[in-house]
Structure formats: structure tokens, C-alpha cells
Image: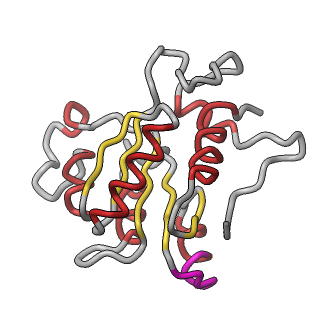
Amino acid sequence: MAGRRKPNQSGRYPKKITKYLGMDATSSAKGVMENGEQPHVLAVDDSLTDRKLIEKLLKNSSCKVTTAENGPRALEFLGLGDDQHTNLEGRISKVNLIITDYCMPGMTGYELLKKVKESSIMKEVPVVIMSSENVPTRINKCLEEGAQMFMLKPLKQSDVKKLRCQMMNCRS
């Protein structure tokens, strides 16, 4: 897996992720957050096959999953669509992680990442970019823009376990 964020010297991941996800050191191994809910992941991919695979892997790891087939639909779900600028607070869908394909027609995963990070309300949500192509310049561009990780497709259960570990067990 290329471009993975590294843990700090104590072997833990950044505190801001733990804080945003509403978790503490006592979060259970079953994946329940301190508020008693499963983490909610928004999975964005134009390929139905890849969306179904990601959804299955995440659900196997006790995540609530919402899928979107493209960037504009993801923004609409998040309350960040072009026609959703009024009363934004009330329309925001609470997600704990966004995982998106890089190559999609209309709006790339990189463009989606930029929109999310430009939003004052959504900018703290971790975004993971995935691609079937290992292109170092693309990986670096995404990480520099604020992506939490860059993962190579196809995703495997071990990749999702790394995401879950990061979402559920990190503290600093």
C-alpha cells in the first residue's frame, strides 16, 4: 500500500482522527464508537463491481456503508452539492470516513477530496483515495491535498482492517 500515513513515535495514529471519529481508548474491538454507533463510511466509485466489493469488505468489518457512483452524488449526500449552500449545517450527513476511487468520469477522486477539504464543516473527515494505478505523482498530489491514505485496488480485507484499526484504535 503506497502513501500510507505513518504512526507517530509511540506507534499511534494522529489524535485528530480519533477525536473526529468520536472514539476513545476504550472503544471495543467490535468496532463500536464511544457513542455506541458503527463508523459510517461513504464509498465512492464509478464501478458497480468495485463499489459492491468495498461495501462488502466494510460491512464485514462492522461499518455502516453508504455508496455513491460519482463525485457529484457524494457531494450531494454530504450536503455539499451546488444547490445545497443554504442551511448547510442541517443537511450535513455524518460520515466518519470517505473512501473514493481516483479515476472517475466527471469528477475525479482528487477533485472530490479538494471539495471536501475546502468545506469548513467536512474538512476534518478523513479521505482515503484508491486507484488501480500506482502513480507516485498522483499519490503525492493526493496526500499533499489532505488525503489520509492512498490505497491500491482491488481492496482486500487486510486493507479494510488497517482502515478499521486506524478508525477505532488510534489515540496519541
Magenta segment: 133-139
Q: In the shown orientation, is residue 86 left or right of residue 163?
A: left
Q: In the shown orientation, is residue 53 left or right of residue 24?
A: left
Q: Quadrant of the N terminus?
A: bottom right
In the orientation shown, which residue stands out farthest toward the right? 9
Residue 50 in picture, x, y percent from top left: 37, 63
**Rendered view: 114 above or below 120:** below
Is 137 magenta? The answer is: yes
Residue 104 in picture, x, y percent from top left: 31, 75
Q: In the shown orientation, is residue 166 left or right of residue 48?
A: right
Instruction: Place residue 73 in its image quadrant.
Output: bottom left
Q: Quadrant of the C terminus?
A: top right
Instruction: Place residue 99 in its image quadrant.
Output: bottom left
Along the line of sight, which residue is nearer the eye, 116 or 39? 39
Is 163 magenta? The answer is: no
Which residue sits at x=52%, y=32%?
A: 21
Which residue sits at x=64%, y=51%?
A: 158
Which residue sits at x=57%, y=50%?
A: 157
Residue 109 in picture, x, y percent from top left: 39, 69
Q: In the shown orientation, is residue 124 left or right of residue 149?
A: left
Which residue sits at x=49%, y=64%?
A: 129
